[in-house]
Amino acid sequence: MCPASKSKHIPRATIQRLAIYLQVLDALDNENVEVISSERLAAACDVNPSQIRKDLAYFGEFGVRGVGYNVPKLIQSIKESLGTDRIWRVALIGVGNLGRSLLRYQGFLKRGFQIVAAFDCDPFKIGDTVAGLEVMCPRRMKEHVRDLHIEIGIITTPAERAQRAANHLIEADIRCILNFAAARIQVPEHIYVEYVDFFHHMYALTFKYCIGEAQRAEKTPSS
Amino acid sequence: MCPASKSKHIPRATIQRLAIYLQVLDALDNENVEVISSERLAAACDVNPSQIRKDLAYFGEFGVRGVGYNVPKLIQSIKESLGTDRIWRVALIGVGNLGRSLLRYQGFLKRGFQIVAAFDCDPFKIGDTVAGLEVMCPRRMKEHVRDLHIEIGIITTPAERAQRAANHLIEADIRCILNFAAARIQVPEHIYVEYVDFFHHMYALTFKYCIGEAQRAEKTPSS
């Protein structure tokens, strides 16, 4: 059974912060830091300490008063609660610039995700090898997904091919889709979809900058 | 003056959704759709109609009752409110796999961002041309940022070099940083930073999947 089942009510914003905590804790673990106080962890994560304590309490981690959290144990607890204390096998569809860079990215396996198959409908790409994987025709997806025990599909096609890619994944019985394409996709209810769109970060930057500049202009007396 | 100054209180979650609306509206505009009801827009964005109406009301867009929103006008309003109705000039630092794929990505310019300079401290990369840009030494950043009127810096270095990259950007008077590196960075208060970390999407998928499977298992009578 999936370990996350014990913590059904973790809100989305908490999962987002858990990803940050995990990143920071992994870096601490690499430096052989064994124990960290919630205050120091909070500062490193740019989150306030009470928020961290509240987030970690969701899955029963309270730390030791006056001492703090045990780093390797906390990493293990977070991974268990997210379901990433094991390897998830992943297929990628769309071997363009972004697809290639994700296939070559070493960070996936460190976090519990292994890309084991790459698909593209372009006949000129089929048969190429990228990061040790042979690019395959999406028509052969179903057999590969079954044989390779793939559970997650990543879409990195152009926007106009995202829906077709999603259809291939769904037909191959993949239930979890991470969509990097700049398009919304329609999926049946039993399919889980997450969209990666870094433009909202760009917009948040330009928006904050504009607000900041406007406030600065207000403070500066006009002559 | 920055157009966003008129709408200071747009919450973060709304900005995130504005990015979705903009993506969907741009696709509609490309298909020459001129008017869309909030119901249809909501369905295409996978958001409920009252949420869309509330979000758009933040910057004075109410649509016409019984008709809907004028697509090109709404795109323009959203862009104005986010400050992206003009081109922002961007520098990228870290020309690895991800950096290269972002340099080659056509989507930036469509959304109002133009990458005009690329930096890397690797002497074997300096002087290379990627997507028409010569890779330059970060030590020369300050003069290039000034000459090219760059306002945003994108960090795509390995995690352990992210802080050094941020320092270069800050010394070059860049105020807005988009950090793709898997590391938190320390910056002075007047610098705006956004982190792009798609792993929280992966975690959200594995978490939802585990919850879903656990619920299915509960429903299935054990024999």
Image: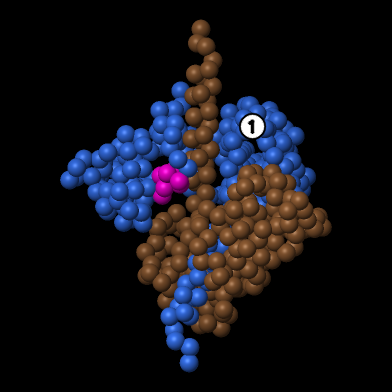
Chain colours: A brown, B blue
Amino acid on which disc 1 is placed: Glu
Residue visible at 33% across and 53% down in the picture: B48
Q: Main secondary structure of the magenta part?
A: helix
Furthest residue in direction right, as rendered: A32
Q: Is residue B182 above or below residue B202?
A: above
Furthest residue in direction front, as rendered: A65
Q: Chain of mark 1?
A: B
Can see residue A42? Answer: yes
Q: Is residue A150 above or below residue A38?
A: below
Residue visible at 56% across and 70% down in the picture: A6
Where residue A128 appears, x then y in whole percent? Answer: 59, 70
Where residue A113 appears, x then y in whole percent? Answer: 62, 68
Residue visible at 62% across and 30% down in the picture: B190
Q: Which residues are magenta?
A: B13-20
Residue A49 vs residue A170, the one in the foreground: A49
In the drawing, does residue A217 fall left or right of residue B59? right
Q: Is residue A38 magenta?
A: no
Quickly name the residue at label 1.
Answer: B189
- Determine the image quadrant of residue A100: bottom right
